[in-house]
Image (cartoon, rainbow, N blue to C red):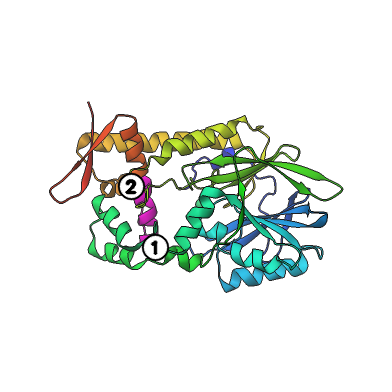
Amino acid sequence: MANPHESALHYPLGDALPAPGTTIEVAPGVRWLRMALPFALDHINLWLLRDRQDGIEGWTIVDCGIDDDTTRARWEHIFAHELQGLPVLRVIVTHMHPDHIGLAHWLTERWSTAERECRLWISGTDWNAGRMASQSTTGFGGDSAARFFARHGLIDPEALARVRARSNYYARLVPKVPGRFRRLMDGMVLTAGSAASLHRWRCIAGHGHAPEHIALHCAELGVLISGDMVLPRISTNVSVIDIEPEADPLPLYLRSIAALRSLPATTLVLPSHGKPFTGLHERIDQLQAHHDERLAEVLAACSERPRSAADLLAVLFKRKLDLHQTTFAMGEAIAHLHALQGAGRLTAVAGVDGVLRWRTIN
Ligand SMILES: [Zn+2]
């Protein structure tokens, strides 16, 4: 959902955007590039860190883009013109969503040599989830997803048929996840930089958006690579999906972003979508308020009469949604319902039609 209070944030680079196949330095040794995405969300930000590993000077890539010809060609352009003739030494992936991990297999193969493997670094949970999703139909479509959405009131036969048909959604964007990885964990400190200037990046695990999202904070540079956990213009997707139908991800997400308040207010945030910004604490306040408002709306709607998640789409989103957006919106609506259930405010009753409808507990 678009941020109505975006003016409280500051964009130190103004309207500057890296042109396709080029980069902009956003901090010493940290470069920003963008790749196009074929969704309503039309781009992803990726990052290059000047690095040195095993005595070799080069670069670390943070997040990859989806696997398509355009993205591969733009990477080749960057390799030819933006790396000062140096190799890519490793690929860090913040989380398993297709726009972040899609090309990890190609990038790591592209830069591995007989002497040295270019390794994928990622949380263990997201590596497993990505490997599984690239080889199956879980989570984003197919019969199981269609049944899950029907249970939550999405009964339009055409929409369900399209969800059922979309069984290769993830694998189409992520045909492969590397078979070997190095595990990132909360609190782990990575060192990146050139011989002249090394920087320490602390891994910060976050939950509620992906299984085990890793953001990276460098105190010396005052920079947070926030991934999808904190975005300036849109709220992070927090969804319940069919493979974990009773999940309660919203409290996990809110706790994760609250923990980022311990970072300095002046931190330059490098988000995966939108522009680099300062105003981390304001943005966390805005996101907390956003979800408090959505929870209040859901509670008010359910106190009038029992409502399914599908009934709540009009309450929560107030605009026309295409199928892709509808499936995300359903996941978000269910996340808010489950948070209220967890707080003891709502309970669900299955109707004779099999649809779950939620009512307030008095
Ligand atoms: Zn994501």
Residue 278: x %, y % from top left: 64, 40
Residue at x 55% of width, y 67% of height: 67
Separation (CA) of disc 2 from disc 1: 16 Å
Of 282 and 7, the residue lying toward us: 282
Seen in the picture, residue 49 relative to 223 is either above or below; the reply is below
Most extreme residue toward the right, as rendered?
A: 196
Seen in the picture, residue 167 relative to 269 is either above or below; the reply is below
Q: Which mark is residue 245?
A: 2
Seen in the picture, residue 40 relative to 114 is either above or below; the reply is above
Q: Which mark is residue 137?
A: 1
Does residue 231 appear in this view? no
Residue at x 81% of width, y 57% of height: 56
Seen in the picture, residue 212 relative to 133 is either above or below; the reply is above
Magenta residues (range): 317-333
Identity, as a three-letter code, of the amino acid under mark 2: Pro
Contact between marks 2 and 1 (CB within 8 A): the answer is no
Identity, as a three-letter code, of the amino acid under mark 1: Thr
Does residue 223 show up magenta in the picture?
no
Q: Which comes sooner in the sequence, label 2 or label 1?
A: 1
